[in-house]
Amino acid sequence: MVQIEDLRAAFAARLKKALAENHIEPWGAGVRLSKMTGVTPKAASKWLNGEAMPGPAKMRSLSEELNVPLAWLQNGFEDTSMNSRSVASAPSNLAMVEQPAVMYRYPVVSTVAAGAWAEAVEPGFSDRYETSDYKAKGRAFWLEVAGDSMTAPSGVSVPEGMLILVDPGVEARHGKLVVAKLPSSNEATFKKLIDDAGQLYLKPLNPGYSMIKCTDDCKIIGVAVRVTGFL
């Protein structure tokens, strides 16, 4: 299973590749990215170091400024090498046919607040769906993150507005990012699962928030297996 850390590292590699193809030197990349997107050079450097990913608006800006497909930059679905573009643009009676990626469709269900307990429902029918290359083991669904309790100052960070793909079929273990719910109140939250000598806790990635003790009434709905800024 691909972890969020791996997704961030893969994005950083694609971003560096796009920068190189645009003849942007690594030593000044953070400043150039900040000018393209309006973020601080420090925030842009986190993208390059695999510590964070841009939100949907910034991702789109990067795609346009670097002249690469948004789907490739965001998820790696297309090959955007300079050689590929040169071949595709050369006059020829042969057409390049792109092979479709295998995609799976999952419903977007009610919002989970990352900063506090918020209303959520059991996964079910939805009038909105998003796709992913991930083949779920269980009845997977997308949830939108709200609040800043999962926005970390460094390392893994899942800011507000990101979509997380939750798979109930994946085993929830120590260190996993999970969605948990109190069945009695039908409320859910998105946190990191901590197992301390058999006692489970839900830990925010933002150090400004406290851990939540997971009592017997606490139900782990599923594990976050994908995160993206589709919104």
Image (spheres, rainbow, N blue to C red):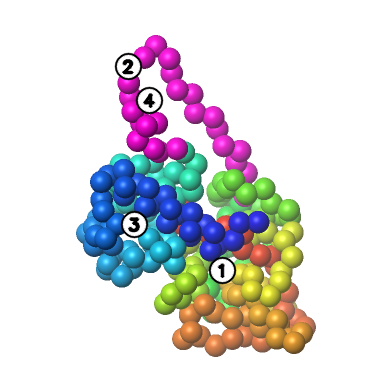
**Mark 1 to mark 2 CA distance (whole Å):** 50 Å
- Of the two numbered discs 3 and 1 on the same chain, state the one appearing first in sequence: 3
Helix, strand or loop at label 3? It is helix
Name the N-terminal-most of marks 4 and 3: 3
Residue 112, disc: 1
In space, the residues marked 3 and 1 are separated at their CA atoms by: 23 Å
Frontmost of labels 3 and 1 is 3
Nearer-N-terminus badge (1/4): 4
Q: CA distance from mark 3 to mark 2?
A: 34 Å
Label 2 crowd (10 A; few <14 / some 14-19 / many >=20): few
* Nearer the camera: disc 1 or disc 4: 4
**Identity of the amino acid at label 4?**
Ala
Nearer the observer, disc 4 or disc 3? 4
Q: Which mark is residue 58?
A: 3
Q: Give the CA separation, mark 1 to mark 4.
A: 43 Å
Residue visible at 64% across and 74% down?
175
3 or 2: tag closer to the N-terminus: 3
Query: In terms of depth relative to the viewer, which is nearer, 116 or 36?
Result: 36
Check whether the beta carbons of the residues at disc 4 and disc 3 lie within 8 A of each other.
no
Q: Residue at x 43, y 53 (%)?
A: 13
User: According to the image, label 2 marks what residue?
Assistant: 91
User: Is label 4 in a helix, a strand or a loop?
Assistant: helix
What residue is drawn where x is 61% and y is 56%? Answer: 2
Circle 3: is it few (<14), some (14-19), or many (20+) Cα within 10 Å? some
The residue to which callout 4 is attached is: 88
- Mark 2: amino acid: Pro
Residue 104 lies in the magenta stretch:
yes
Q: Is residue 64 visible?
A: no
Residue 185, position in %: x, y?
68, 78
Q: Amino acid at mark 1?
A: Val
Q: Which picture quadrant has residue 46?
A: bottom left
